Amino acid sequence: MHTVYRAQNLFDAHLVKDALEAAEIPAFIAGEYLTGGVGQLPAMDFIAVMVPEAGLARAQDVVREVEAVLGEARHAIDELPDDPLVVPC
């Protein structure tokens, strides 16, 4: 198994895993259950999405696509106003 993505959180890991499986690439999330062991401390660099050797090349393309979409979504969130009562038009 090869690591194709190091996730910041479980949500991102599952988005990548789901995208890989939709492309018919088997995927596994390593470290998924370790986050519960650290309690309220931030879990850093524990979660990785892994694929077998046979799907590695295609998986890297899928991961790049998902990372681009996640980057756009994070950028959009960063541009929201700090006041939750202000709604952008």
Image (tube, rainbow, N blue to C red):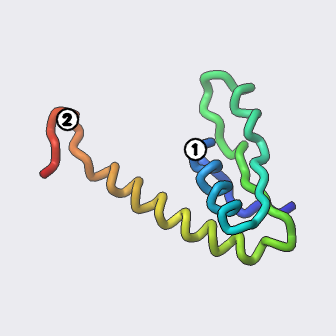
Q: As displayed, is residue 36 above or below residue 9?
A: above
Give whichever of 37, 63 is nearer the camera. Answer: 63
**In the displayed structure, does residue 10 sit left or right of residue 56?**
left
| Secondary-structure class at tag 1 | helix
Query: Which image quarter is the N terminus in?
Result: bottom right
| Secondary-structure class at tag 2 | loop
Mark in front: 1 vs 2: 1
Q: Residue 56, percent across and down?
A: 78, 72
Q: As displayed, is residue 81 above or below residue 68?
A: above
- Give the residue type that dot 1 points to: Phe
The residue where tag 1 is placed is 11
Q: Residue 78, percent across and down?
A: 33, 50
Identify the residue at horizontal 19%, vertical 35% (top origin): 83
Q: Residues within 10 Å of mark 1 (few under 14, many from 20)?
A: few
- Give the residue type that dot 2 points to: Asp
Identify the residue at horizontal 25%, vertical 47% (top origin): 80
Identify the residue at horizontal 71%, vertical 70% (top origin): 59
Q: As displayed, is residue 33 above or below residue 71?
A: above
Identify the residue at horizontal 41%, vertical 53% (top origin): 74
Query: Which mark sits nearer the N-terminus, 1 or 2?
Result: 1
Q: Residue 10, percent across and down?
A: 62, 42
Q: Residue 81, percent across and down?
A: 21, 44
Count numbered badges in the picture: 2
Disc 1 versus disc 2: distance between alpha carbons? 25 Å
In the picture, the disc for residue 83 is 2
**In the displayed structure, does residue 32 sit left or right of residue 76?**
right
Q: As displayed, is residue 9 above or below residue 17?
A: above
Q: Residues within 10 Å of mark 2 (few under 14, many from 20)?
A: few
In the picture, the disc for residue 75 is none
Q: Residue furthest top?
A: 39
Q: Quadrant of residue 62?
A: bottom right
